Structure formats: C-alpha cells, structure tokens
Image (tube, rainbow, N blue to C red):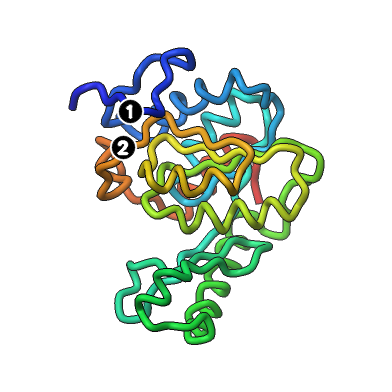
Amino acid sequence: MPWNRTARDDPRKGRPVRLPYADRAEAGRVLAGRLAPLGLEGAVVLALPRGGVPVGYEVARRLGGPLDVLVTRKIGYPPQPELGVGAIAEGGSPVFDRELLGRLGLAEDDLAPIVDAERAELDRRVQVYRGGRPLPVMYGRPVVIVDDGFATGGTARAALRAVRGRGPSRLVLAVPVGAAETVRSLEAEADDVVVPVAPWEFRAVGQWYRDFGQLADDDVIAWLARSGTGA
C-alpha cells in the first residue's frame, strides 16, 4: 500500500505514515513518536483492551508513565449486536448515539437488559485484568487514552467522559488510525486528539494493519505484566 498522506499528517510532527502498519506494536511506536513532543512525560496511559494494550505499552514506554487498562464495552443493537448504539466505560455512565437510536426507533430504556449484561462482562474483565487493584489516580495528572484505532468512536467517547470525571490536568485521546469524520466528532471530548492517519474512506480498523490478530485476556495480562503492571 502506498504512503498515506491526509490532512492529519503534519510533516512538522514526523514523517508520513506508511500503511498498513505491520502490527499493533509498530503502530504504538509511531503513535508514541507523535505524542513525545507534547510534554506528556510521566502521563498515565490507559489502554482500551484488548487491542489497545500493545499500542499503549509502546506509548507508556516512550512517555515514561504507568500503563493500565480502562475497560469499555460496546452496547449493541439487539437484532444486530455488532452495530454499536452506545458504549460504557468503567466508572462511567452509558453513552448512547441518540441520533442512531432515533433512526432505529429505540429509547435508552429499551436497552437496559443489554446494558446490564455489558456491565457484568465489564466487571468480569476488570477483575481478570486488575484483580482488586483500583485504577491509577488521575486527578491533576495528564492522562492519555489509547486504542488501536476507531471507526465510530463509541467506546472512545465513553472512555473520555468517564476519565474526564476524574479530574485529569490534561486529557488526550491517541490512536494510530481513525476515521476522519469520527476524529472530528471527538475533538470536543478531549484536550488533544492525536491520530497520525485519519482516512476519509474507512471500513474497519483491521484494514490498516497487516497483522491484526484477535487478542485474548491472557494477552492483555501478559502485556500488563511486561510493563510492570499486574493484577
């Protein structure tokens, strides 16, 4: 695939990005390079599992801050669960796409059973990934939320709102690749949005990686252990 240059590729912040990324680790190193000039040394890096964790590992290593996970879950449309109509992040309230709900003829209350099920899975993953360990203190500290990419950005939005409530001094959303329209829609949710490549033609995050294998809970635990973070 040729070099991909978009409006978000600023030559002053680094060379154009060659796509597809080899894997999430390479994407993380590219992203870390874009974050390094922003004065975020020692920032808390919160990766959205599962795919955001290898990316977050590289970012945390470059910034010299702690790595942890912030667990999120998509809230799916019941007849078509892969269609996200909202999302929830630990410590936050459900965030819904109200425009989409309106088109589908749904109210938020209609999704209460789905929300309860996703909360239960969220709690399970929190226990698996962190045990009884709480999230790191974020009040008065810069926080960087990292994922491996986003198409609609529902889970990223839920994560940003959950973290904003914890009082960080600076809130940054950073992903290696994201749909251009979604990047614009999320700019109001964070102090900085760092996306090295934001294509307008975007089908799925996986199309921008050569190796985009599915990760398991054990992979998340291994990456956290490698960073010195563990349940």
Which of the two residues, 158 or 130, is positioned nearer the viewer here? Answer: 158
Q: Position of residue 199 (x, y in %)?
A: 31, 37
Work out which residue is located at the far right of the displayed protein and give it.
140
**The quadrant where residue 120 appears:** bottom right
Query: Could you tell me if the residues under marks 2 and 1 are in contact, i.e. CB atoms within 8 Å?
Result: yes
Which of the two residues, 125 or 110, is positioned nearer the viewer here? Answer: 110
Question: Dot 2 corresponds to which residue?
Answer: 199
Q: Position of residue 72 (x, y in %)?
A: 54, 59
Measure how far apart labels 2 and 1 are at the Cα level.
7 Å
Residue at coordinates 36% horizontally, 44% vertically from top-left? 179
**The quadrant where residue 2 appears:** top left
Question: Dot 1 corresponds to which residue?
Answer: 6
Residue at coordinates 30% horizontally, 24% vertically from top-left? 5
Q: Position of residue 132 (x, y in %)?
A: 72, 60
Of the image marks 2 and 1, the number of the one nearer the N terminus: 1
Question: The N terminus lies in which quarter of the figure?
Answer: top left
| Secondary structure of residue under mark 2 | loop
The mark found on residue 214 in the picture is none
Figure check: 112 above or below 133: below
Instruction: Check disc 2 and give the amino acid type.
Output: Pro
Left or right of residue 90, residue 73 in this image: left
Left or right of residue 179, residue 90 in this image: right
Which of the two residues, 74 or 7, is positioned nearer the viewer here? Answer: 7
Instruction: Check disc 1 and give the amino acid type.
Output: Thr
Residue at coordinates 58% horizontally, 54% vertically from top-left? 159
Q: Position of residue 183 (x, y in %)?
A: 44, 43
Give the number of callouts: 2
Residue at coordinates 60% horizontally, 18% vertically from top-left? 37
Which of the two residues, 202 or 124, is positioned nearer the viewer here? Answer: 202
Figure check: 203 above or below 67: below
Count residues near mark 1 (Cα–Cα under 10 Å), then give few for <14, some for 14-19, many for 20+: some
Left or right of residue 157, residue 164 in this image: right
